[in-house]
Amino acid sequence: MKKVILSLVVMFCMAGLVSASINVDVYSGHTTVGGGAPYSGLVGTFTSPDILFATSTGFAWHPFGLSDFGAELTGCLSVASDATYSFTLASDDGSLLFIDGILVVDNGGPHPPATVSSSAILTAGLHSFKVQFFEDFGGPSGVDLYLPSGVTYAECPVPEPATIVVWSLLGAIGLAYGWWRRRTG
């Protein structure tokens, strides 16, 4: 599955299709485990050029005026070269960093402002990431993701409608062919 997703990312990059920066979905419902997922009650969505919501607000980040909330932040990272990279999450309350679907930094659960770092071996190129975050119990709130040297936020590939139509058509043709082969033996 991971290879299929990576192939799709590469294919869309080669087609030159891109979208906006980091997507931030904010929810009214969350758990107090890990980074707060699963979430419920989408309140709103916005984009950001980075993840520095603790630093920029002095740990007083309350999007859409919410005192308790969950947030899922998604985007892409551009990695300069194959290497081991150290990522840091600072948050109050819990936060988790996933790169290509793999948990890299666990700063989860309810806690006061805390910073946790961990490393991942990454290849050069684009990688998807997700930060899960929740704020509960009032008080300080925010999350920061500090990127290591050689890693930057990048535009994520998004298929154009024409590309979606072509791939959907190819998929339909493949399904029809499979159905026909089963029927005709």
Image: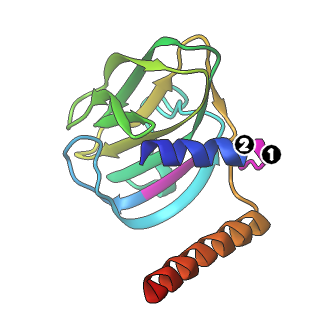
Q: For this view, does 131 lie left or right of residue 46? A: left
Q: For this view, does 38 lie left or right of residue 77? A: left
Range of residues picked out in magenta: 14-26
Q: Who's the residue at 60% across and 53% down the image?
A: 46
Q: Is residue 20 visible?
A: no
Q: Which mark is residue 105?
A: none
Instruction: Give the residue type that dot 2 points to.
Output: Cys
Q: Which residue is mark 2?
A: 13
Horizontal and vertical percent position of residue 151: 60, 19
Q: How many marks?
A: 2
Judge the density around disc 2: few (<14), some (14-19), many (≥20) Cα neighbours within 10 Å: some
The one nearer the camera, 99 or 74, is: 99
Horizontal and vertical percent position of residue 43: 46, 65
| Image vertical order of residue 113 relative to residue 64, above or below | above
Per the model, the C-alpha gap separating discs 2 and 1 is 5 Å
Horizontal and vertical percent position of residue 107: 28, 28
Extreme residue in the front direction: 185
The one nearer the camera, 28 or 166, is: 166
The one nearer the camera, 175 or 33, is: 175
| Cβ atoms under marks 2 and 1 closer than 8 Å | yes
Q: Which mark is residue 16?
A: 1
